[in-house]
Image (spheres, rainbow, N blue to C red):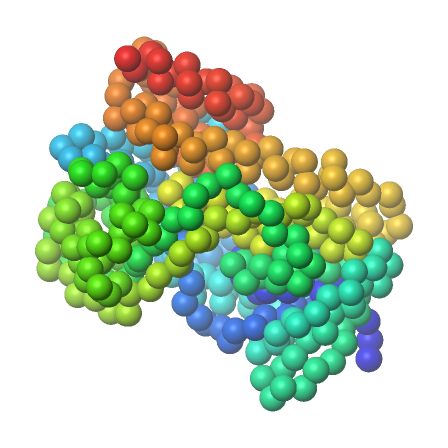
Amino acid sequence: MVTPDVVIIGAGPAGSVAAALLADAGFSVEVLERAHFPRFSIGESLLPQAMEWLAEAGLLRDVVEAGFQHKNGAIFRWGEREENFDFRTKSTDGWGTTYQVRRDRFDDLLAKGAMRKGAKVLFGQTVTAMRPDPECPCLTVRDEEGHEREVKARFVLDASGFGRVLARLLDLETPTSFPDRMSVFTHVEDNMPVQNYDRNKILISVNPNNNQIWYWLIPLAEGLCSIGAVGMPDHIKPYGATREEQLAALVAESGLMSELLVNAKRVRDVGEIAGYSARVSSLTGPGYALLGNAGEFLDPVFSSGVTIALKSASLASHALVRHLNGEAVNWQTDFSEPLSRGVDTFRAYVSGWYDGSLQKIIFSKPGDARQVKAMITSVLAGYAWDDENPFVRDPHKYLKMVEELCG
């Protein structure tokens, strides 16, 4: 059996973008995916910064031509207070628009794009063991008939998302700074009157009785919406005995979101994800690196998951091309540290959201509001690696400063 240069665990956005980049660079790539595509996944709202890495991988045209819902910003709502963030008014150069996607279609077209570029993608494959090695790491893989085989490569990338394959197999899990939260969610035919809401924007609403509970409403193409509620388990569970009861009761308290969905019809079962925040002790090891959610997941509030995943795929692929070509690569300085800078920026914003400081900023009008808003908008649009932006360079300091200006 021919040993591929790279084996990638998972064919989600990070895995497919990395596969496309490495195949374009002339390396043999094998992707091992446990599920069969298309398959449902949550996390439908992309950020404009992600467009750069889709373009880099030669997959942007696939996305543009797929007919996904256009996205140009976000609306934050708390009771009668509302603040509109248009990503096209950000302070950072780059894409100001993107898409809100059904992940079953989005992930499938990215995987097919990677295959078109020469990557081999195998479905129904479960990785059960890993033997790290700087020269020839080895995976044990089980197919759906229960047959096991060893797959060796020159390097392994883990893009398994919430499956977190190598983090589990190699005992890399480490405590996260965020408490356990949960989300309940579904898709609906929204039947929203066109004049009542701008479908080009995601709606983030704060529960009027508890600012630790928030909601998303993500308009999708073909009259669908992804809707969900997020909070601590002891805040969510009193709303009902079942997920359906919980989500219905929570949405009833959401204000504008409830009004927009008055004629909505649910088209899939209500799902639940609990304890989703995760972190690892190291993003790299002998012969492997972890991409996207396989390494760390923060929180869904600012839709940063896919953006971080694609950034990690880009960084890892560039470092890996040099590594496979015999050049010296410092995975800490060439991959882990630059990736972590943006993740840490998002972490500061997630922390600020839940401690109330960022909610205060969003729903207030600080001095010099236009310039401040443009810089915050850049981060909300995914530009969390722009060191020219003080709200990226030192997010805790500048968010605290603006919070104080809000009184």
Q: At 33% across and 33% down in the image, what residue appears?
A: 86
> Would residue 86 be found to the left or right of residue 244 on screen?
right
365 over 247 or under it: above or below: above
Q: Quadrant of residue 405?
A: top left
Tell whether 190 sits left or right of 123. Answer: left
Q: Would you say 343 lies left or right of 378 here? A: right
> Looking at the image, can residue 103 be seen?
yes
Question: Where is residue 272 drawn, in percent x and y?
Answer: 35, 61
273 and 79: which is toward the camera: 273
Which quadrant: the N terminus?
bottom right
- Which quadrant of the figure has residue 87? top left
Decide if residue 40 is on the left or right side of residue 2.
left
Check the picture and name the quadrant holding the C terminus: top left
Q: Position of residue 337 (x, y in %)?
A: 67, 36
Determine whether 84 is above or below 179 in the image.
above
Identify the residue shown where x is 76% and y is 76%. 150
Q: Residue furthest right?
A: 326
Instruction: Tell me what residue is drawn at x 87 percent, y 45 percent.
Output: 327
Can residue 28 be spotted in the picture?
no
